């Protein structure tokens, strides 16, 4: 028993030690792992070998981490074009797990894991949850979807490895979620922030006060969300809301996580090497400058990813985090270049709309953006749910609110858009990733 206990302690120490590794040691570790990854990719995956040959690059030319910039990028279409197994660097007999992400168009992308890959993922996810203050003794309601989507099993394995108690409830069936949260005395929940909002809404309808439950931590990811939404969630539920980041192509959740200070997300960079590039030129950008996040896996066997372009916009935060972790931090990702739409020549991100709405007092983050084309001109309408005021001057109060929202949107977007106030529960709630944008311009 004592031996087992000591082993467990040693394991826990080993897991967290990498979060606090001196920077020079981390760079040495990254370089060694990067070289091994490049070699593996070059020797075993045709696409990588051909791309390197085109650029006249070989793994042996990597002398320092900065040399990575000479190697080719990988993009989402590469995963589609090689569907399902074309990027495998391990024989299928060594693959113990497959996941897939449906995406919005065409074939899904498929990712494969050896047992070691699953272990790496588990390590990254347990460090993520530990950074969110989850540990042994916590009761974790895992409301991320189980299945081909990576969210459910990723959080599940990570939480179990920490010694927490996992409730594998998966997504959906909101009333049952609320019953479980209350009856099982749940202390931490993992889901998308939009689903948590829906849970809060439904709990209120059922007369359950989430503030009075033991729930204290929310581990929220799988969609971009804003700091304004965090403040709203924290005020409404009195929990600590953490932003976590990951993507199927790289491993699933577990690539980066906030710590209790909420000053950016620490990247688990012993497994995932981050670069920030200028999306146009592809050149790496210095610390503090905003650009596209590019990730290279350092520990993966079955499907190493070289310089994968995430389409997520962020920047490295300068300086070190007072929490003591030496892992580099990126700004929370509020914007995906995929989400951006152009309306009358102006670039708009759904997260800007969210920030503008939440800046108006008393507003709830239930909204939807609808794009249409009328007589050749793009129109944008923001539908926002409001609770009708009870006062006798109801019409004036609503008009006032309408004007405030229109003004806030104009200020933030630099564009005049239509605002339509709709009644409570009008906008469809999500049980996974929220659909904020409906583009009817080409239908
Ligand atoms: Zn920190």
Image (cartoon, grey):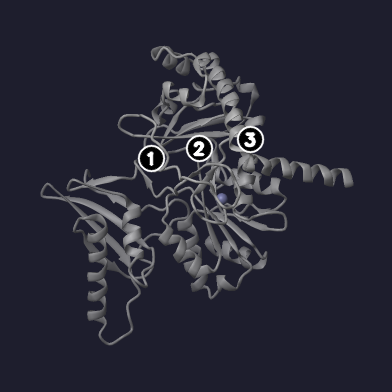
> Is residue 362 shown above or below 257?
below
Left-right relation of 135 to 113: right
Whichever of labels 3 and 1 marks the residue nearer the N terminus, that label is 1
Q: Residues within 10 Å of mark 1 (few under 14, many from 20)?
A: few
| Badge 3 residue CB within 8 Å of ligand 1 | no
Q: Nearer the viewer, mark 2 or mark 3?
A: 3
The percent coordinates of residue 101 (x first, y second) are 47, 38
Tell me if label 1 and label 2 are in contact, CB under 8 Å.
Answer: no
- In this view of the protein, which residue sits in the foreground, 322 or 301? 322
Residue denoted by label 3: 120
Left-right relation of 75 to 252: left
SS of the residue at dot 3? helix
The percent coordinates of residue 186 (x first, y second) are 64, 62
Q: At 48% across and 47% down in the image, what residue appears?
A: 222
- In this view of the protein, which residue sits in the foreground, 57 or 352? 57
Residue denoted by label 2: 248
SS of the residue at dot 1? loop
Q: Nearer the viewer, mark 1 or mark 2?
A: 2
Whether residue 299 is visible: no
Q: Residues within 10 Å of mark 2 (few under 14, many from 20)?
A: some
Residue denoted by label 1: 104
């Amino acid at each position: 028993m004592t031996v087992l206990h000591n082993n467990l302690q040693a394991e826990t120490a080993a897991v967290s030690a990498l979060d606090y590794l001196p920077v020079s040691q981390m760079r040495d570790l990254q370089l060694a792992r990067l070289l091994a990854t490049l070699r593996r990719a070059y020797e075993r995956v045709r696409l990588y070998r051909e791309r390197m040959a085109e650029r006249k690059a070989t793994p042996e030319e990597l002398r320092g981490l900065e040399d990575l910039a000479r190697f080719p990028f990988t993009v989402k279409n590469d995963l589609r074009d090689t569907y399902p197994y074309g990027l495998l660097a391990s024989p299928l007999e060594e693959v113990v797990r497959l996941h897939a992400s449906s995406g919005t168009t065409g074939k899904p992308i498929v990712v494969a894991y050896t047992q070691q890959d699953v272990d790496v993922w588990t390590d990254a996810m347990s460090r993520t949850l530990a950074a969110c203050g989850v540990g042994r003794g916590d009761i974790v309601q895992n409301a991320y979807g189980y299945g081909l989507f990576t969210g459910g099993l990723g959080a599940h394995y990570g939480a179990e490895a920490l010694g927490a108690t996992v409730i594998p409830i998966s997504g959906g069936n909101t009333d049952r979620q609320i019953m479980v949260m209350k009856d099982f005395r749940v202390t931490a929940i993992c889901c998308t922030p939009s689903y948590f909002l829906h849970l809060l809404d439904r709990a209120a309808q059922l007369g359950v006060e989430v503030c009075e439950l033991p729930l204290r931590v929310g581990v929220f990811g799988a969609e971009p969300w804003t700091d304004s939404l965090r403040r709203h969630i924290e005020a409404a539920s009195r929990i600590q809301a953490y932003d976590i980041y990951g993507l199927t192509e790289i491993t699933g959740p577990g690539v980066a996580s906030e710590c209790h200070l909420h000053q950016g997300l620490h990247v688990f960079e012993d497994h995932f090497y981050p670069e920030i590039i200028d999306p146009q030129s592809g050149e790496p950008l210095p610390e503090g400058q905003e650009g596209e996040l590019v990730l290279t896996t350092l520990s993966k066997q079955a499907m190493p990813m070289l310089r994968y372009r995430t389409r997520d916009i962020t920047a490295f935060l300068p300086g070190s985090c007072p929490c003591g972790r030496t892992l580099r931090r990126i700004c929370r990702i509020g914007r995906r270049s995929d989400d951006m739409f152009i309306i009358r020549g102006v670039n708009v991100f759904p997260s800007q709309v969210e920030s503008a709405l939440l800046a108006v007092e008393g507003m709830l983050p239930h909204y939807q953006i609808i794009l249409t084309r009328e007589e050749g001109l793009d129109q944008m309408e923001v539908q926002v749910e409001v609770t009708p005021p009870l006062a006798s001057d109801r019409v004036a109060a609503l008009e006032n609110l309408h004007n405030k929202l229109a003004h806030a949107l104009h200020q933030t977007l630099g564009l005049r858009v239509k605002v339509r106030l709709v009644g409570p529960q009008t906008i469809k709630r999500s049980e996974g990733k929220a659909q904020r944008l409906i583009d009817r311009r080409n239908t």
